[in-house]
Image (cartoon, rainbow, N blue to C red):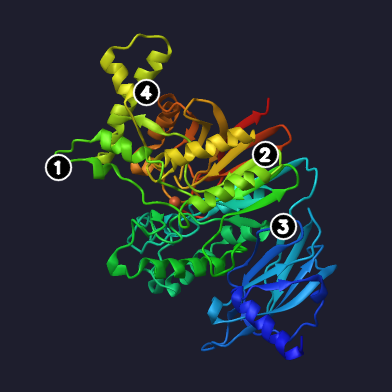
Amino acid sequence: MSRFTRRHFIKAALAASGGVWVSTPLQAMTRPELPSEVAFRHGVASGDPLQDAVILWTRATPVKSGESGPVKVIWELARDSAFKEVLRRGNAETDLARDYTVKIDVRGLEPGSRYYYRFIGATEQSPVGRTRTLPEGGVEQIKLAVFSCSNYPAGYFNVYQLAAQSGDWDAVLHLGDYIYEYGANGYATEHSAEIGRALPEDNAGELLTLTDYRKRYALYRTDTGLQSLHASAPFIAVWDDHEISNDTWKGGAQNHNEGEGDFFARRAAAVQAYYEWLPIRPPAGERHPQIYRSFHFGGLVDLHMLDTRVIGRDRQIEFADYMDEKGRFDSESFAAALADPGRSLLGKTQFQWLADTLEKSTGRWQLLGQQVLMGKMHLPAEIMVNFASGKKSTAITPELIALKAASMKGKPLSESQRARLQQQLPYNLDAWDGYPAEREALYRRVRALGKNLVVAAGDTHNAWFSHLKDAEGTLVGLEFATASVSSPGMETYLGLDEQGAVELARGMPLLIDDLQYCNLHQRGYLALTFREDEVQAEWKFIDNIRSTEFAEAAGHRVVHRLA
Ligand SMILES: [Fe+2]
């Protein structure tokens, strides 16, 4: 290959990969070129670790006003935080076409190793980031921190800060709602001005264009808690709906209408900005919205990150579609629609991929990192009808909890009381509960393969622990769901004070058969520790998101040992 054509090839390859610089050991110590004058205002990040590779990320903002051409930076990877032993160094160029973000896919690294990295411009250096490659072979334990639903106008990202200070994570799992698409008067913005988290004027509308989405990421990345967490551990991220628009499915979204233009153009813009700003290595390249992919933590944990939103989800069904004008609910048509085996959350291709991947994966634990609750959350129908008709009142819920508690203590119930408890409806049709046939198919596969299944979920803004049971009632796995970083939870939806939320959380596992624990009012994250014969889930909470002053609150811990 001549010099000219090789250059051409590299250029073409970079264009195809969306401009991700792939570094190999051969390029290890290229002579640094003179870097440009840039500022590192959005910190550094790393992500998608493999046994021999990790993505390094920064944004190099040109500091000379009016500059729009390409800028150059130098990156370094070292064994130590003082950079006495620099192992790799390279040049990277970025420009407006990728919003001045820089992504380096550093290859040829050692497994299970800690590394430090930084970026260098003409007049300043980035903060130093710490990262880690995936281990190989036998591993004693794996510690993961799990997050979802960080909403800038709703509060400060103290939850990220707590995790950055608390642990030495093998990886951080982000299950989506990393940003929210709403405008300045939208969801969860009520206190934004008073706490100093109002959306800036040039990004105050609902996100629709590439520029809108990019600015939102840039805003979120000014949060010091988020910057700290990114700099402390590699992220493994998937989007939920709000990286695009509320209740996204494969052909649209609840929060998208014709007046907002073509849904797929909007989605492409959202996906592009996500890939630019997240340290992710999309398996089908930076132009393709496929993000489901696997990570292998030695022989201990196989992690499969799923997309329950964009790539394959059929449209959600809604209770409202089965109500007539008089508010009567057509339960038969509803049940038939819900049970339709043709409806899919993952899409056929992803489901098949997951089934095949689970079969091939030999790790002690199979962990699914995904968005929406998989556990069955069926509530007495009268509570759901109350919800669906927009009533916030929860008076009937304590009544039903008391009834259930009495029946569990052996108190005989009247026929009508029994009916009140037994007539049940799924709480959230946007979750796996809205796609029960596919969930059952997944459970069948997991049982047939005899895997130890753990599912991590986000999306709801509250903390949950459920036994995953199939239609026959057999335990198939465990689901641990994380509270939100800052988005409001059930306490706000139901207008509950702290005591009310605590009481309801105590009663919910009585009402919902497979539910073991929940927290309905605190912001936090989930720490998962895997060992050969046990998994430990620890929900960590904080006391405040209205300022950057906060303290850790009491958490909750569950340990599950394999028989
Ligand atoms: Fe959310």
> What type is the residue that disc 2 sits on?
Trp
Q: CA distance from mark 4 to mark 1?
A: 30 Å
- Answer with mark 1 or mark 2, whichever residue precedes in sequence: 1
- The answer to whether marks 4 and 1 mark residues whose Cβ atoms lie closer than 8 Å is no
Can residue 441 be seen here? The reply is yes
Would residue 51 be found to the left or right of residue 265 on screen?
right
Quarter-of-image position of residue 113: bottom right
Q: Secondary structure at mark 3?
A: loop
Q: Position of residue 243 (x, y in %)?
A: 46, 60
Q: CA distance from mark 2 to mark 3?
A: 18 Å
Which residue position is annotated with label 4?
Answer: 401
> What type is the residue that disc 4 sits on?
Ile
Can residue 541 be seen here? The reply is no
Which residue position is annotated with label 3?
Answer: 50
- Answer with mark 2 or mark 4, whichever residue precedes in sequence: 2
Q: Position of residue 363 (x, y in %)?
A: 71, 42
Q: Is mark 4 within 8 Å of ligand 1?
A: no
Quarter-of-image position of residue 511: top left
Q: Residue at x 54, y 88 (%)?
A: 67
Q: Residue at x 26, y 34 (%)?
A: 331
Q: CA distance from mark 3 to mark 1?
A: 55 Å
Foreground: disc 4 or disc 1: 1
Q: Secondary structure at mark 2?
A: strand
Q: Position of residue 151 (x, y in %)?
A: 45, 56
- Answer with mark 3 or mark 1, whichever residue precedes in sequence: 3
Would residue 388 be found to the left or right of residue 55 on screen?
left
Which residue position is annotated with label 1?
Answer: 325
Which residue position is annotated with label 2?
Answer: 365
Q: Considering depth in this image, is 497 or 135 the residue closer to the camera?
A: 135
Placement of the C terminus among the 4 image quadrants: top right
> What type is the residue that disc 3 sits on?
Leu
